Image (spheres, rainbow, N blue to C red):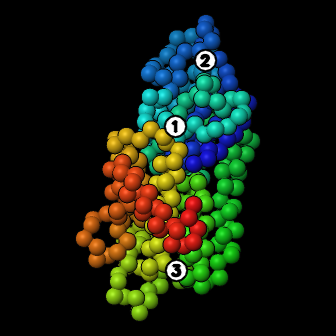
Amino acid sequence: MHSLYFEGKLVNLSISSDALTVYIKFELTKSISSCMTACSELDFVHCNENLTEEAEHFKEAQFIIKNDNLAFDRSVHKEDNDHALYHQSNPKIGFREDDEHFHLKFSVLLTYEHLELILAVFVKYKLIDDNEKNELLLLFALRQENNKDLLKRLDHQPDRDTRQIICYVAQCDSNEVLLNLHECLLSDEFDYLRELDNLLLTRKWQGTDNNGDIVQSSKSWSMIEKSIALKMANNIRVVNITHTPEGCKERAIQLAQYSFFAIKRKADSSIERSGMYQAFQDNDFNDFDKSYKRHFSSYNDSP
């Protein structure tokens, strides 16, 4: 998952799906050049002596983010199994792994509205100004432009549009963009993708509706949701080299908050959850890879 990078006057920011990484450009303490980062064993918020004014502001902003109902999950440390998710290759100074930085991970994938609330805290504590906040939000919103272009190309031909959507999904490496696409496709305009074909009712497919409920649906919609779920899981898999059973289970539980992610696609199947979800949760990437390649290759665009 490629991160979104933003260079500010006091901090550089990187957004990676469910986390905000803050690269500081100021001194933390008055007496020594630095103390510790959230990637080390100790946490910055516990270092309270001789902090600079900017560091005090950062400490206060972190406290609000972690305690003010903003879905904060945890700080990510360098020894954590998912640490690689938050360091994408980028040659810019200020975005390197050895620069002073802090990972703030959230329990949900970041949306525009959620990011807006988080950045408002940074503005309040003078880490960024309003212009910087608005510029970053614009950059975040622009990531959805490809979704808009895709939706404009759809022409209400279910089979053709389903193939076009799935081929697009296969090339998308941003989970927040995929979630936005799913949300857009749930609008009434695209109900034709969910219409049941009476000739195919011998095999009952299921998907989710705009309330997040699991309902009987068309094969087209079921396969679109399967594609998005597979790609989201694979986006995490290919970036995070260090896979552990605990880490995979944590990510699977997080993604299962989105009701379409883990459901079985065939309503009459004896399994409780999709095979893809079970393989991802169990750290079984032999089965996961087989499911992934088989699914996307059937739409003639194997990623």
Per the model, the C-alpha gap separating discs 2 and 3 is 54 Å
Can you identify the residue that label 1 sits on?
84
Mark toward the viewer: 2 or 1: 1
Q: Is residue 190 above or below residue 228?
A: below
Q: Residue at x 64, y 78 (%)?
A: 154
Q: Kindly give the residue lying farthest to the bottom in the view shown.
A: 199
Who is closer to the viewer here, 237 or 16?
A: 237
Who is closer to the viewer here, 195 or 72?
A: 195
Q: Are marks 2 and 3 in contact (CB under 8 Å)?
A: no
Per the model, the C-alpha gap separating discs 1 and 3 is 37 Å
Q: Residue at x 69, y 74 (%)?
A: 152
Can you identify the residue that label 3 sits on?
193
- In this rendering, does residue 163 appear at all? yes
Query: What percent of the width, then of the height, locates residue 226?
Result: 45, 67
SS under mark 1: helix
Q: Residue at x 64, y 65 (%)?
A: 147
Mark toward the viewer: 2 or 3: 3
Q: Name the amino acid, label 2.
A: Leu
Q: Is residue 14 above or below residue 287?
A: above
Please state if 282 lies on the left or on the right of 294 as rendered. Answer: left
Who is closer to the viewer here, 7 or 157?
A: 157
Q: Name the amino acid, label 3.
A: Leu
Q: Name the amino acid, label 1.
A: Ala
Quarter holding the C terminus is: bottom right
Snapshot quadrant of residue 96: top right
Q: Residue at x 51, y 59 (%)?
A: 231
SS under mark 2: loop
Can you identify the residue that label 2 sits on?
28
Per the model, the C-alpha gap separating discs 2 and 1 is 25 Å
Query: What percent of the width, then of the height, locates residue 67?
Result: 44, 36
Query: What percent of the width, then of the height, locates residue 123?
Result: 65, 36
SS under mark 3: helix
